[in-house]
Image (tube, helix red, strand yellow):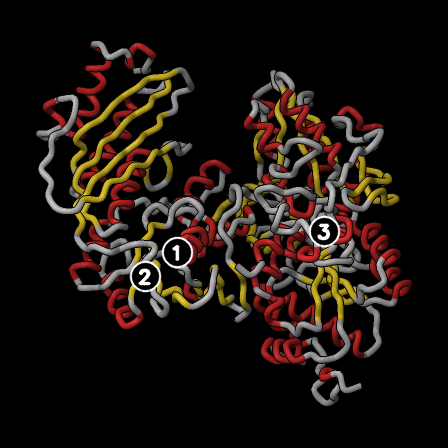
Amino acid sequence: MKIDISYGSGGKQTSNLINDIFIKNFDNEVLNKLEDAAVLDMSGKIAFTTDSFVVTPMFFNGGNIGKLAVCGTVNDLSMMGAMPKYLTTGFIIEEGADSETIDKIAYAMKLAAAEANIKIVAGDTKVIEGNGNVYINTAGIGTIMKEGISIHNCQKGDAILLSGNLGEHHAAIMSKRMGIENNIMSDCAPLSLLVKDLIDNDIDVHCMRDVTRGGLATVLNEVAESSVCRVEIIEDSLPVSDEVKGFCNILGLDPLYMANEGKLIAVVPQSQAKKALEVMKNNKYGTNAQIIGSIVCGKGVNMITTLKGNRIVDILYGEGLPRIC
Amino acid sequence: MCVAVPGKIIEISGDKAKVDIMNNICEVNIKLVTVKIGDYVLIHAGCVIDVLKKDIAEEILLMFNELEEDANDDSWAGKN
Amino acid sequence: MMTLGQVKTELKEYDGEPIKIMEVCGTHTSSIFKNGIRSLISPKIQLISGPGCPVCVTASAYIDKLIDYSLMENHCVLTFGDMMKVKGNKLCLTQASAVGGNVKILYSPLDAVKIALENSQTQYVFAAVGFETTTPIYAVLIEEMKKNKIKNLKLLTSLKTIIPAVSYICENEEKIDAFLAPGHVCVIIGYSDFNELAIKYHKPFVVAGFEGEHILAAIYEIVHQIKNKQSNVKNMYVNAVSEEGNIKALAMMDKYFEKADDYWRGIGIIKNSALRIRPEFAEFDAGSTFEEYKESPPKGCRCRDVILGRINPNECPLFSIKCTPLNAIGPCMVSTEGVCGIWFKNREA
């Protein structure tokens, strides 16, 4: 059934949309009350964040925009050492979208929310003119499990861990857009339990960041700037699948600058690096984790290449467009 | 100026072929070359531009074997 | 007979006369950067980049025409990703898209055929830019257009040839000691054309592949030749390059394209350095000849000297201060694979 502009009017059709899709999929005692706001019980320090999702195509190998919308915000909270508890979601639907499509998206959100053990407790829907695209905003709150985790907190001598293979989300999306057949799946996943494992095992995590837009290179540059240090990484330690390498070679892309949606870097004291690696590898989203480098004196980010040369790794400028030159 | 990538021909149909580039399958045009299934080729912007003679690791090894040593004189150290 | 380890040691310890090696291929520039090659060789071996980024040497007038097409009703510009950020006299394609221009990025020119067939109401213009590696593919495209009787697709060409450019550099620049010849251009054209240049200018020309090992081996070969006062053409990309090149591709190029003089941004006119669609195939041409090339090099911009290898990017007064990848003033910075773009990425933080 096609959604037209009347579904955003706030009347019966809006109410049907909310009940038939959002209440059905997100079903919890807070949301089901359909109040103007969710009233929640929280104590102690909380983390609070928001993110918006506009990916095309909306459905890709390994997920869809709905799964992304839940995992993205869950992960942002987790990176601060918080256990995610509640999400809100706002949908902006271009008329012409299918209600079955929205239902599939909401169902994916339901599954992701269940895995992350969070509830979607408030939402909003708007319908605008357009071509059937869907855009989602999520905001989330979580309770702080470990204080002091910050991008400003990296210390000289710290080790940097990466939880798994680079570039998979970006490659999955671009493969679909460019008509390249492969088995690359988006790595979109909630990382809250991986983070909890690190904290429960007494790893003194100084900083965590999820590797999203701009790729690992951008995240590491943010660390170097905020913690006023240099980040040195080793090319041979970076986990990249052969398939993603091949994909990058076809389009002239660099895995360092490609987005993930289910990977994090963790900066930990050198003395705990091995233990942290073991903890990560024991989690289903960290099986390919590696120690990729360390925090040293200086500025910026450099990489020791496979040939043992030295290369500066700058932040991403502009878009990472496919090249022939 | 030329991002080109090696791949293996797995299927041919007229002027088109399917290539396997590290498990990525692409459709390419083969009008600029003469190929058969199993050939290793060089692909640029959706077209095969070359048939490769060897596997790249083997080629690199042979390439170093061909370089001449200058180990017995001092001129590398600029003492000429 | 050498090993990689021995080659690395020799190149790191080289302490002879300074040697300046020019590479003329944006993909070589990129590979040198990606492998950290400069950190592996003696500071007495200097690697400089020449006019090997076809995107960077494309005339502003060409970009302006593409922008105009993108903004026309019922028109759409199809392009490689490389061209999106290159500014003409005012805008680049990314900016044109932001103000309502119709632009689509393709991986292969041949994808344009399907798009044109499926959207017969739209007039498509393909931004056909490149060196000899890419030109044969445009010839294949024209054949496909003929076969499918496509009327709503044309090529706006800025196709350049490498030998005239290298010859120009040799003629006008004295301090370059040797060249890394572009591996994938040589796949198409072979390497015999470099013999004449090697003999005339007494410089080694070494055809190099794109792995870090290829580049190190080629640099070693150059240093070895210079030390032994040799100036030979040597093919070190044997896997892919033959002396005569790809005969089929050369024939296709010759069928549809002819030589012409061309304007190189930052350099000026170089004779016989362009390939233009032959007059008998003019129906496929979107107007690739220009009456004049209005270039107003910005004040202080030293792109010309950079492209000709006279100075390094960091010797330009605008480099990284006023001219950055986000605010590119000259053509060498516009593409992140242009010389200044690469140096910017490589600069010490």
Q: Chain of mark 3?
A: C
User: Reading the chain from its start, which is encountered first: label 1 or label 2?
Assistant: 1
Which type of secondary structure does the marked residue at label 2 adopt?
A: strand
Above/below status of A194 relative to A310? above
Q: Name the residue rendered at 74%, 55% in the picture.
A: C50
Find disc 2 in the rendering and name its residue. A267
Amino acid type, callout 1: Val
Residue C334 in picture, x, y percent from top left: 64, 43
Q: CA distance from mark 3 to mark 1?
A: 35 Å
Check disc 1: other Cα within 10 Å, few if <14, some if 14-19, many if 20+. Answer: many
Q: CA distance from mark 2 to mark 3?
A: 41 Å
Amino acid type, callout 3: Gly
Amino acid type, callout 2: Val
Q: Nearer the viewer, residue C108 or C321?
A: C321
Question: Residue furthest toward the right?
Answer: C200
Which type of secondary structure does the marked residue at label 1 adopt?
A: helix
As drawn, the label of residue C20 is none
Find disc 1 in the rendering and name its residue. A223
Q: Are marks 3 and 1 in contact (CB under 8 Å)?
A: no
Which type of secondary structure does the marked residue at label 3 adopt?
A: loop
As drawn, the label of residue C52 is 3
Q: Name the residue rendered at 72%, 31% in the picture.
A: C156
Is C172 situated left or right of C330 in this image?
right
Above/below status of C70 relative to A15? below
Q: CA distance from mark 1 to mark 2?
A: 10 Å
Front label number (1 vs 2): 1
Q: Name the residue rendered at 55%, 69% in the picture.
A: A309
Is B36 situated left or right of A272 in this image?
right
Q: Nearer the viewer, residue A49 or B38?
A: A49
Q: Chain of mark 1?
A: A
